[in-house]
Amino acid sequence: MASPLIVAFGEMLIDFVPDVSGVSLAESSGFLKAPGGAPANVACAITKLGGKSAFIGKVGDDEFGHMLVNILKKNGVKSEGVCFDKNARTALAFVTLKKNGEREFMFYRNPSADMLLKEEELNMGLIKQAKIFHYGSISLISEPCRSAHMAAMKAAKDAGIVLSYDPNVRLPLWPSADEARKGIKSIWNYADFIKVSDEEVEFLTKGDPEKEDVIMSLWHENLKLLIVTYGDKGCGYFTKSFKGRMPGFAVKTVDTTGAGDAFVGSFLVSLANNPTIFNDEGKLKEALVFANACGAICTTQKGAIPALPTPPDAQALINSASK
């Protein structure tokens, strides 16, 4: 049986990563270019794990934009939803890993092509073929992309498609922290599935992400599943009828970029193939073990897309941990 289509919407850009880790952007003597942008990473994670995905967004009609679309194609991601902008450049981000593997971002978008996607450029036919529609919050920051995002989300919701939201907070891109909170929460109550990191819980609630009442303040009536990721400590899950924690996997971390996207891609493949997962705790736990393994493997290599795991990679990690 063919895997159901998952459509990811949002930004795809070039990440420039220092060729030496543990230095600041200013200290770095050289950079490696890596394809990035959370929704695009998720789309590639899905196909690498045997799922079927498409990406909708906009890049510049420049060398980098064409390179990115070729990377989607090479990864088996359907790219007919991607538009090229003749007047704007593909977005760039300089990302450095400090000594602890944490990241520092510097973005070049004034405005970049991804911010200029218009509602009339949306491939609605492609969206309506999806079983799951996945998006972040960066596409909400400015017009016309925000209106395109809202229209795409509404079309998916009206067609009965599962809405998946990973806010992916990137504060340097928003006018202020308050604007970021407001923007991210403006579409909160539409999603069927939300994945947030512990840091994002802290940012959105101003509370302690280890406390259940703090996490539950993010719950809403339409939500079927809320997942909180705790980096290498695994994740917590919350549904209407059950909740729990799943441990993570210990690996040698090189670069955390894309770990959350590998996790989400993996989980969405499980969900697309088995929609009962929201109501079946056993199946949910299985999917989360696999997603945790995918996230962990992604941190063992530089760059997001090159580090995305295959099912045998994830299975090998799970097997070695259970010994």
Image (spheres, rainbow, N blue to C red):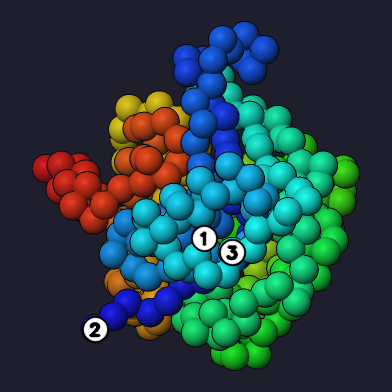
Dividing the picture into quarters, in which one does residue 176 lie? Answer: top right
Residue where numbered disc 1 is placed? 227
Q: How far apart are marks 3 and 1 (CA)?
A: 29 Å
Residue 229 location, x and y as percent?
50, 50
Q: In this view, does 262 lie above or below 257?
A: below
Give the residue displayed 45% in from the left and 52% down from the top.
70
Local secondary structure at mark 3: strand
**What is the spatial separation of the Cα atoms under label 3 and label 2, in whole angstroms?**
27 Å
Drawn side of residue 272 relative to residue 106, left or right: left
Report if residue 77 is visible in the image: yes
Q: Is residue 212 above or below residue 4?
A: above
Q: Mark 3 and 1 residues: CB-CB less than 8 Å, in contact?
A: no
Residue 1, label in figure: 2
Please tell me whether mark 3 or mark 1 is closer to you in this view: 3
Displayed quadrant of residue 199: top right
Quarter placement of the N terminus: bottom left
Residue 232 percent coordinates (x, y): 41, 39
Which of disc 2 and disc 3 is earlier in sequence?
2
* The one of 319 and 169 positioned closer to us in this rendering: 169
Q: Mark 3 points at which residue?
A: 82
Spot occupied by residue 148 in the image (x, y as percentages of width and height): 75, 71
